[in-house]
Image (cartoon, helix red, strand yellow):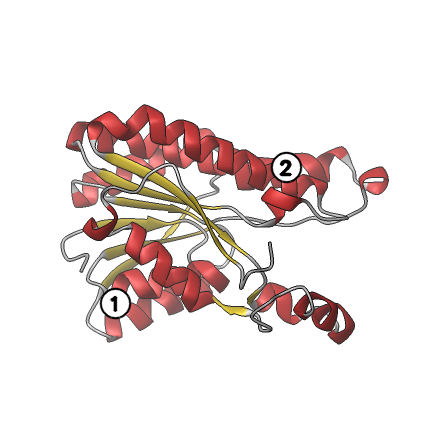
C-alpha cells in the first residue's frame, strides 16, 4: 500500500497516465494529476479517485518549462510537505520520416518527453534528497530501445530517458532514492485507437502474446516500483511489451 505517500503523475489525465493515477490512488497515495491542456480530463480522473475514497488533485504545468516545473514542485511541497513518488509520464508524438521532419517537430518532442522528465526529476529530487527517500519512475518506450521508422524524434527522446534513468539512479541511490524506467510496447490507448486495422494486424504479428497491452498492466508495474516491495530495484528498464522486443 502507498498510504500517506504523495505521488506526482505527469500527463496523468489520459491513457497510461490516467491508469497510473487511478492505480496509485487506489493504493492509498495522494495523487497529483498533472496536465497541460486537458483540464476536464484531469478533473474527471480526480473525481474518480475521490469517489472511491482516495485523495487527488488536478494541477496544471507544462513540464517542458523549467521554471514552471520548479514552481509546480515547490507548491506541492508547500501544500503537502513531501514528495514520495514521481512518475514522469508526460509525452507527445510528432511522427514523420527523418527527411520530412521539421526542426520544431524534433525539438517539441525532445522538450516534452526528455527535457520534461529532466525538469521534474531535477526539482523533485532536491526534496527527496532531504527526505532521504523517494521513488522515481520514468516512462520510456520499446521504441527507445529498437527505433521505428517515422519516429526518430520520439525514439531519440525515449532513448534519452533510459540514459537519464540509469545516470540518476547512480547519483541518487546513496540517499535511498530509486530511479527506474518502464518501457511499454503496444498499449491500447486513445493514441493507438486511431490506427487503421492493417497497421494493428501487422503489429499483432510481431507480438508473441498475440494481443495489445492494457494501460492497467503498465500501471500495476509502476505501482509496484513505487512501493516498498521494490526498495532494492534501481537503474532498471523493464519492458512490458508481450515479448515484442
Q: Is residue 150 above or below residue 99?
A: below
**Mark 1: few, some, or many residues within 10 Å (few <14, many ≥20)?**
many
| Rendering coords of residue 112 (x, y %) | 55, 40
Q: Is residue 153 above or below residue 126?
A: below
Q: Could you say which disc has been placed on residue 55 in the image?
A: none
Regarding residue 200, the answer to whether it shows in the image is yes
**SS at circle 2:** helix
Q: How many marks?
A: 2
- Is 22 situated left or right of 12 in this image? left
Q: Nearer the viewer, residue 45 or 222?
A: 222
The quarter holding residue 178 reads top left
- Is 100 situated left or right of 179 in this image? right
Which label sits in the foreground, 1 or 2?
2
Asked if marks 1 and 2 touch (Cβ < 8 Å), the reply is: no
Q: Nearer the viewer, residue 207 or 220?
A: 207
Instruction: Please name the residue that numbered disc 1 is placed on.
Output: 26
| Rendering coords of residue 156 (x, y %) | 63, 37
The quarter holding residue 68 reads top left
Which callout, 1 or 2, points at the residue further toward the start of the chain?
1
Q: Which residue is rendered at x = 46% and y = 53% of the image?
A: 11
Q: Is residue 153 above or below residue 209?
A: above
Where is the N terminus found, in terms of image quarters? bottom left
| Rendering coords of residue 164 (x, y %) | 46, 31
Q: Is residue 229 above or below residue 42?
A: above
Q: Which residue is rendered at x = 42% and y = 32% of the image?
A: 166
| Rendering coords of residue 245 (x, y %) | 60, 54
**SS at circle 1:** helix
- Is 235 situated left or right of 231 in this image? right
**Mark 2: few, some, or many residues within 10 Å (few <14, many ≥20)?**
some
Give the distance between the C-alpha atoms of the residues marked 1 and 2, in whole angstroms.
Answer: 34 Å
The quarter holding residue 22 reads bottom left
Instruction: Please name the residue that numbered disc 2 is placed on.
Output: 156
Amino acid at each position: 500500500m502507498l498510504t500517506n505517500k504523495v505521488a506526482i503523475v505527469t500527463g496523468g489525465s489520459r491513457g497510461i497516465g490516467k491508469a497510473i493515477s487511478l492505480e496509485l490512488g487506489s493504493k492509498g497515495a495522494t495523487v497529483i494529476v498533472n496536465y497541460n491542456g486537458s483540464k476536464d480530463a484531469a478533473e474527471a480522473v480526480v473525481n474518480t479517485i475521490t469517489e472511491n475514497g482516495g485523495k487527488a488533485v488536478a494541477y496544471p504545468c507544462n513540464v517542458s518549462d523549467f521554471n514552471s516545473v520548479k514552481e509546480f514542485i515547490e507548491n506541492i511541497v508547500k501544500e503537502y510537505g513531501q514528495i514520495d513518488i514521481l512518475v514522469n509520464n508526460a509525452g507527445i508524438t510528432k511522427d514523420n520520416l527523418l527527411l520530412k521532419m521539421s526542426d520544431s517537430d524534433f525539438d517539441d518532442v525532445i522538450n516534452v518527453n526528455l527535457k520534461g522528465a529532466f525538469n521534474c526529476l531535477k526539482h523533485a529530487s532536491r526534496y527527496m534528497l532531504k527526505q532521504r527517500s523517494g521513488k522515481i519512475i520514468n516512462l520510456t518506450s520499446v521504441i527507445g530501445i529498437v527505433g521505428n521508422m517515422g519516429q526518430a524524434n520520439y525514439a531519440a527522446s525515449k532513448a534519452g530517458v533510459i540514459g537519464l534513468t540509469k545516470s540518476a539512479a547512480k547519483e541518487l541511490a546513496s540517499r535511498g532514492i530509486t530511479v527506474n524506467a518502464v518501457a511499454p510496447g503496444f498499449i491500447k490507448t486513445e493514441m493507438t485507437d486511431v490506427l487503421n486495422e492493417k497497421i494493428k494486424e501487422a503489429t499483432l504479428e510481431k507480438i508473441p502474446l498475440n494481443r495489445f497491452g492494457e494501460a492497467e498492466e503498465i500501471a500495476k508495474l509502476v505501482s509496484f516500483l513505487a512501493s516498498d516491495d521494490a526498495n532494492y530495484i534501481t537503474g532498471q528498464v523493464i519492458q512490458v511489451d508481450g515479448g515484442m522486443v
